[in-house]
Amino acid sequence: MARTIAVGDIHGGLKALIQVLNKVEVKDEDNLIFVGDYVDGWSEAAQVIQFLIELSETIDCIFIKGNHDVWAEEWLRSGEVHPTWYMHGGKETMESYEGFSEEDKATHLAFFENTKMYHIDSENRLFLHAGFTSMHGVEKEVFQTTLYFDRTLWEMALTMDKRIEKDSALYPKRLKHYREIYIGHTPTTNFKSDVPMNAVNVWNIDTGAAFKGKITAMNIDTKEFWQSDNLPVLYPNEKGRNK
């Protein structure tokens, strides 16, 4: 039976990514959906991209674009170093490209360019990096950047009054469009949780890999999940973004 596995933010942690996929025991028929932020943080960003490119040659993968991926894509395309990016993991990502040829970099640029802003599956489940603000759904989002920067969707889901019925005029229209919504971007560790969090029909699977947390992979049908070790354990001589 083919499984659909959603994978949270990776942030250059190749060791953790391999560890979690080994726990999943990925089969040829499985589908993997990555919710973005492949780079920035730990020292193996370029290696993560190379690994994902090769993985997608044998396994059905969907790659969604995260905000960190946008900065890395800009740098690969133009050499432009966004100051915010440099401070938040860009330096480590640039260093990880030492030893990669121009041809390799061009292949990685194509990888970033081909990432999707969002994915909606056949069962009306939405996958995206951060969130969206349009009450008409992701297709009607005015600013594309919102899809990889928004935190209001998650904030709204977390604080929503559980007594509001779905047919109430007060029920957020944003949430009615999709059966389930899977996001990364806002670490669950900000809320003292090192496991995926669920609020209304939104699942947050960013378990803080950029900082002191883990990478999480989740079977979206059964909600079973697997996790890597905490990233600082796997990269003991690095600080990641814990600066």
Image (tube, rainbow, N blue to C red):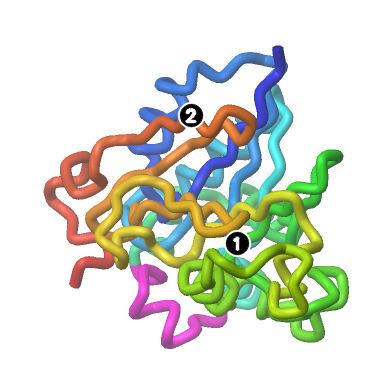
Nearest the eye: 35 or 104: 35
Residue under the point 38% across and 62% down: 187
- Residue drawn where x is 32% and y is 55% of the image: 42
By secondary structure, the bulk of the magenta-drawn segment is best described as helix
With respect to residue 196, does 27 lie above or below?
Answer: above
Q: Quadrant of residue 61?
A: top right
Q: From this view, report whether residue 190 is shown above or below residue 178.
A: below
Residue underneath mark 2: 224
Amino acid type, mark 1: His
Asked if the stretch drawn in magenta spans residue 90, the answer is yes
Point out the stretch of residues depicted in magenta.
80-91
Residue 122 visible in the current orientation = yes
Counting from the top left corner in percent of width and height, residue 21 is at 47, 27
- Asked if 218 appears above or below 106 in the picture, the reply is above
**Residue 102 seen:** no
What residue lies at 81% left-to-right and 62% top-to-bottom? 177
